[in-house]
């Protein structure tokens, strides 16, 4: 399991594992578009991703993801359907996020006595949710990693300066030894995530060990984060000028 609550024993070994590849913003391919949709949608999404680089990775686009995105964005969607579809999309992002973690090859013996050459994920990972909307992604991570430790950060805008301010932060004591799956569903300006990453860095986490899991991002939000931290990895399902900023209120029923 990639998420067992164990410390990394060889953090300073100097060995780095290459990230597994998904659709990246620098890809020249145009995302698939549903047959009944406007073909310019794909062009807009591709244009919005220009110059964001390989650190921004998008889930492979298919009709299932497009439908989930559509239902979440639809203002007529009931809260029950909203939460159901959001949880499905979260699970897809979490699964792909786990696929970005380092692994090693291994051999196991099957019940019939044969040797099987496979892989196992290396241990020493944790999740960190940015409250409150990031907490919506915690269960999806726990569904995949039963024993994973999850830290929390509470960041809100200062009423006077409108700047992001950290009010609470709690992480596993050895967070600096771990790969961090940072969870925040909507990247609008990127300011909240930038502040959260700064807090993680203060606790010894290197940006290249942070994988940001998000559902939707604006070009500005993704660009701001990558410009501030070029080594961070962002995984999302869509980059679009308009983000569903109602997500947190709708998911928790506070709208």
Image: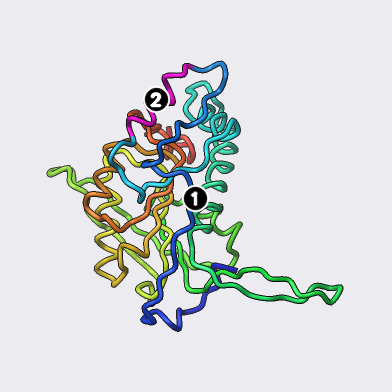
Does 84 sit left or right of 204 as displayed?
A: right
Q: Position of residue 20 (x, y in %)?
A: 49, 57
Where disc 2 sits, the SS reads helix
How many marks the image carries: the answer is 2
Tell me the chief SS of the magenta region: helix
Residue 43 marker: 2
Residue bounds of the magenta highlight: 38-48
Q: Does residue 45 belong to the magenta stretch?
A: yes
Q: In the rendered view, does 236 fall on the left or right side of 145?
A: left
Residue found at x 51% / y 78%? 6
Q: Earlier in the sequence, mark 1 or mark 2?
A: 2
Circle on res. 98: none
- Residue 45 position, x and y percent, is 39, 30
Could you tell me which residue is drawn at 36 percent across and 78 percent down? 14
Name the spot of residue 22 as percent of width and height, x first.
48, 48
Q: Which mark is residue 137?
A: 1
Specify the quadrant that holds the C terminus.
top left
Comparing 130 with 115, the one in front is: 115
The residue that appears at 51% across and 18% down in the rendered structure is 37
Task: Relative to 9, say whether 237 is above or below.
Answer: above
Residue 20 in the magenta stretch? The answer is no
Helix, strand, or loop for circle 1?
helix
Residue extending furthest front? 28
Q: Is residue 156 visible?
A: no
Query: Would you place residue 39 above or below residue 53 in this image?
Result: above
Residue at the image position 36 percent from the left and 81 percent from the top: 12
Q: Single out the residue that lies furthest toward the left.
A: 161
């Amino acid at each position: 399991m990639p998420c067992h609550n164990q410390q990394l024993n060889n953090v300073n070994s100097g060995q780095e594992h290459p990230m597994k590849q998904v659709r990246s913003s620098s890809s020249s391919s145009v995302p698939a578009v549903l047959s009944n949709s406007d073909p310019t949608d794909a062009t807009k999404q591709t244009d919005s991703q220009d110059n964001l680089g390989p650190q921004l990775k998008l889930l492979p686009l298919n009709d299932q993801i497009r439908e989930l995105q559509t239902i979440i964005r639809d203002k007529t969607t009931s809260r029950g359907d909203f939460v159901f579809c959001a949880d499905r999309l979260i699970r897809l992002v979490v699964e792909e996020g786990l696929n970005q973690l380092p692994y090693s090859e291994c051999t196991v013996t099957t019940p019939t006595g044969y040797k099987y050459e496979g892989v196992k994920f290396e241990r020493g990972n944790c999740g960190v949710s940015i409250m409150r909307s990031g907490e919506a992604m915690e269960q999806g991570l726990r569904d995949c990693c039963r024993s994973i430790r999850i830290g929390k950060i509470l960041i809100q805008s200062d009423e006077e300066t409108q700047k992001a301010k950290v009010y609470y932060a709690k992480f596993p004591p050895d967070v600096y030894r771990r790969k961090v799956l940072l969870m925040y569903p909507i990247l609008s300006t990127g300011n909240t995530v930038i502040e959260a990453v700064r807090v993680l860095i203060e606790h010894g986490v290197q940006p290249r060990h942070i994988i940001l899991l998000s559902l939707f991002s604006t070009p500005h939000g993704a660009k701001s984060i990558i410009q501030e931290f070029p080594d961070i990895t962002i995984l999302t399902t869509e980059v679009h000028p308009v983000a569903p900023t109602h997500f947190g209120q709708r998911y928790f029923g506070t709208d």
